[in-house]
Image (cartoon, rainbow, N blue to C red):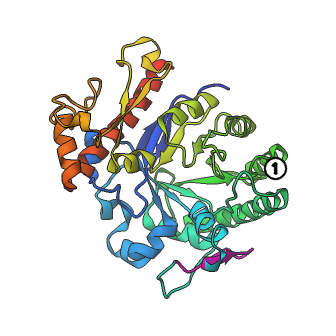
Amino acid sequence: MTRPSGSLRLPRGDLRYPVYLPDATFGVVRAVDAQDLLSVQVEGLVMNAFHLMQRPGSSTVEALGGIHKMSGWDRPIFTDSGGFQAYSLIRQNPRFGRMDEKGITFQPEGSKRKFLLTPEKSVQLQMSYGTDVVICLDDCTHVDASEEEQCLSVERTIAWAKRCKSEYLRLLEQKKVPESERPLLFAVIQGGGLLDLRRRSVDALLEIGFDGFGFGGWPLDAESNLLTDILGYTRELVPPEYPMHALGVGHPYNVLACYELGYQIFDSAMPTRDARHGRLYTFANPPDAPRAGLTGKWLKYVYIEDEKNIKADRPISPYCDCPVCSRYSLGYLHHLFKLNDSLYPRLATLHNLRLMTQLTERIRRRA
């Protein structure tokens, strides 16, 4: 597979490939603000229409000027439609709602209100938020789901994608959106681990026509191994001029592996969640090592709670230029963590995010 190069042009700036987008699910990357994100060279974010429609609520987002103004972030934002969240909520716990041809009906635990998310509503919400990339509503499945379930998912996802595209075009015309301000529209490819269904999904979505595509479905097997065969096959089905988003892929090793398969865009809450919980990422090799230091076991973990860090008067990593490593010691971070002080998650998150942006920089040099 030809490795992707170049950038994605969006209304609020270009994203250089490869790009990692931190998950700002509810409109915030937990523990940090927009200026923090800029300080570690983050280029874009992913927010989630499924969650934002519940908290703070669509009318509140609009009253606050849309997702960019609300969050203080003036660079690109993707908005995920919520297909995966519906899978997590409903497929694993049917008492919370149902999916049918109309869309997704759900009632989160503790909520007195039922929500209906249709393909049209999903596009309406995302465009009203002022997103840079609209992602079509899809019917997500697990890779181990039955063939019958996978077939239903593919056909429903195709039907929903058609409705999303129609609503998207209607809104562009209604709002007279100039080409320079047009958000891109991505569709999601489903099919689980069945190659013929992946091909059916790709062929149908290419015929409808989209600006880019996402790999749909859980990208890991039961042992948390990356489904490289399915990911690679799906990427090969899509012409190389279309950008591909490896949805939910964000472990550093998996980002590099998927880039090698031809994917350009990545997102995951894992790096920031790991940071808050005490697992920090470091490179094992300097950036000027052969192949940008991305050979062998190039990633190491620092577990901040380890007693060996109590008096460690050194940065988390000698190869990191983040604001944390340039100012604070590992011992101080251990102290903050044990105190359960709110400064710890901010500093730890900044460090792990900088490793992710350094990773994309190293990959570009390696290419």
Q: Is residue 264 above or below residue 268?
A: above
108 shown above or below 347: below
Q: Of helix, strand and loop, which one carries label 1? A: helix
Instruction: Identify the residue at image location x=33%, y=53%.
Output: 74
Q: Is residue 12 visible?
A: no
Q: Residue furthest front?
A: 307
* Position of residue 56 measured from the top left corner of the image (x, y, whole percent): 38, 74
Point 40% across, 64% down: residue: 26
Q: Amino acid at mark 1?
A: Leu
Q: Magenta residues?
A: 96-108
| Rendered location of residue 170, percent (x, y) | 61, 68
**Can you say whether 357 is above or below 283 in the image?**
below
Residue wearing tag 1: 197
Q: Residue 94 colored magenta?
A: no
On the rendered structure, is 265 left or right of 153? Answer: left
User: From where the camera sits, is residue 3 visible?
Assistant: yes
Residue at 64% x, 35% y is 241
